[in-house]
Image: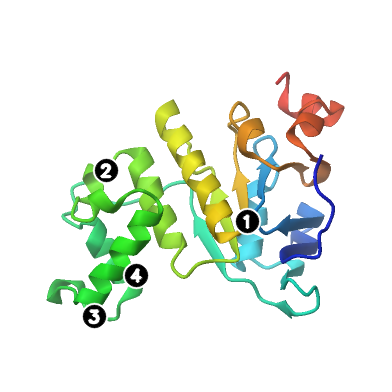
C-alpha cells in the first residue's frame, strides 16, 4: 500500500502540461513526491518521461506548478532540485580528474590553480556519500559506467536537494553496477529524507526499491504500488507482459 499524505514535507506537481503547437507532449500531470520515498516513472518510448523531468527543472516551457511543502504543510517554497542525466557526453581521453570535475562545479577558483583544503574536504565528503571517495584522483575517462553515474549523483547532491531527479541513470550499466546504484540511492533517501524520482525501463529491479510507480503516456495512466501498477491492464497494454 502507498501511504496517504502524511502532512510531512513533499514536492507537488500540479496540472503540469507541455504543449508543442497543437500536440500535447504531457498533459495535466498531478503527482505528490513525499520525502523519503522513491517514485519510479515508467512508460513506453515517447511517453513524455524525460519531458516531465525537464519541465520540473524549468528547462522547457510549461504550464502548471512544482512546489515544495514543508513539514507544517503551510509554507510553499521552490524546491532545491538535484538532477542526474542519462549520459554525460565528454571526451574519454580528457585528463580531467573527478576532483577537477567537482572543483569546476563548486568553486570559482580556476581548476588549473589547484584547490584549497576546504574544497578538497567538500569534494571528499560529497564522494563519500555515494561510496566513491577512492576515485577522487581518478580520471573521469577511466571510470566504469556505474562509477561515473555515482560521481554524477554526488554532484547532484551538492547542495543537498529536496527532490532528486534521475533520468535512466542505469542505462547501459551491468547488473552489479545497477544494484550498487539502487542501494546507494536507497540509503540516501533514508539518511537525508529526500524525495527521489526515477525514470527507468528497468522493470525487474523497480519492485524491490520503488515505493510508488507512475505509468505515463502523455498523461498519467495509473499510479500506486509496483504490484498494483505492474498488474494493471494499462501497463500490460503499453509495456507488454511484465
Task: Identify the mark nearer the N-term, 4 or 2.
Answer: 4
Q: Residue at x 25, y 56 (%)?
A: 98
Label 4 vs label 2: CA separation?
19 Å
Is residue 174 visible from the viewing direction of this image? Answer: no
Q: Residues within 10 Å of mark 4 (few under 14, many from 20)?
A: few
Q: Which residue is mark 1?
A: 53
Q: Which residue is mark 4?
A: 105
Drawn side of residue 237 relative to residue 33, left or right: right
Compared to residue 176, the image places residue 66 above or below, namely below
For the N terminus, which image quadrant?
top right
Q: Which residue is mark 2?
A: 143
Picture disc at residue 156: none
Drawn side of residue 229 relative to residue 138, left or right: right
Residue 221 occupies which quadrant of the picture? top right
Q: Secondary structure at mark 3?
A: loop
Q: Residue at x 77, y 60 (%)?
A: 17
Picture disc at residue 109: 3
Which residue is at the front of the view, 141 or 120? 120
Residue 233 coordinates in the image, percent (x, y):
86, 26
Q: Secondary structure at mark 4?
A: helix
Residue 143 occupies which quadrant of the picture? top left
Q: Secondary structure at mark 2?
A: loop
Task: Identify the mark nearer the N-term, 3 or 1.
Answer: 1
Q: Residue at x 18, y 74 (%)?
A: 115
Q: Nearer the viewer, mark 3 or mark 1?
A: 3
Is residue 235 visible from the viewing direction of this image? Answer: yes
Callout 4–callout 2 Cβ contact below 8 Å: no
Amino acid at each position: 500500500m502507498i501511504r496517504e499524505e502524511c502532512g510531512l514535507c513533499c514536492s507537488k506537481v500540479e496540472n503540469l502540461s507541455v504543449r508543442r503547437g497543437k500536440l500535447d507532449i504531457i498533459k495535466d500531470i498531478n503527482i505528490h513526491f513525499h520525502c523519503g520515498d522513491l517514485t519510479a516513472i515508467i512508460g513506453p518510448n515517447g511517453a513524455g518521461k524525460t519531458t516531465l523531468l525537464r519541465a520540473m527543472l524549468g528547462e522547457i516551457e510549461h504550464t502548471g506548478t512544482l512546489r515544495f511543502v514543508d513539514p507544517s504543510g503551510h509554507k510553499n517554497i521552490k524546491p532545491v532540485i538535484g538532477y542526474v542525466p542519462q549520459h554525460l557526453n565528454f571526451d574519454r581521453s580528457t585528463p580531467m580528474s573527478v576532483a577537477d570535475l567537482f572543483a569546476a562545479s563548486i568553486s570559482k577558483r580556476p581548476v588549473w590553480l589547484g584547490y584549497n583544503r576546504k574544497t578538497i574536504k567538500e569534494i571528499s565528503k560529497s564522494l563519500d556519500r555515494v561510496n566513491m571517495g577512492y576515485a577522487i584522483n581518478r580520471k573521469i575517462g577511466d571510470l566504469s559506467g556505474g562509477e561515473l553515474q555515482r560521481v554524477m549523483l554526488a554532484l547532484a547532491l551538492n547542495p543537498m536537494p529536496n527532490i532528486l531527479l534521475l533520468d535512466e541513470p542505469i542505462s547501459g550499466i551491468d547488473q552489479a553496477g545497477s544494484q550498487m546504484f539502487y542501494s546507494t540511492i536507497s540509503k540516501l533517501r533514508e539518511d537525508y529524507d529526500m524525495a527521489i524520482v526515477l525514470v527507468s525501463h528497468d522493470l525487474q529491479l523497480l519492485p524491490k526499491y520503488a515505493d510508488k510507480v507512475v505509468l505515463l503516456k502523455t498523461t498519467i495512466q495509473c499510479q500506486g504500488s509496483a504490484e498494483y501498477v505492474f498488474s494493471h491492464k494499462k501497463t500490460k497494454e503499453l509495456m507488454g507482459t511484465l
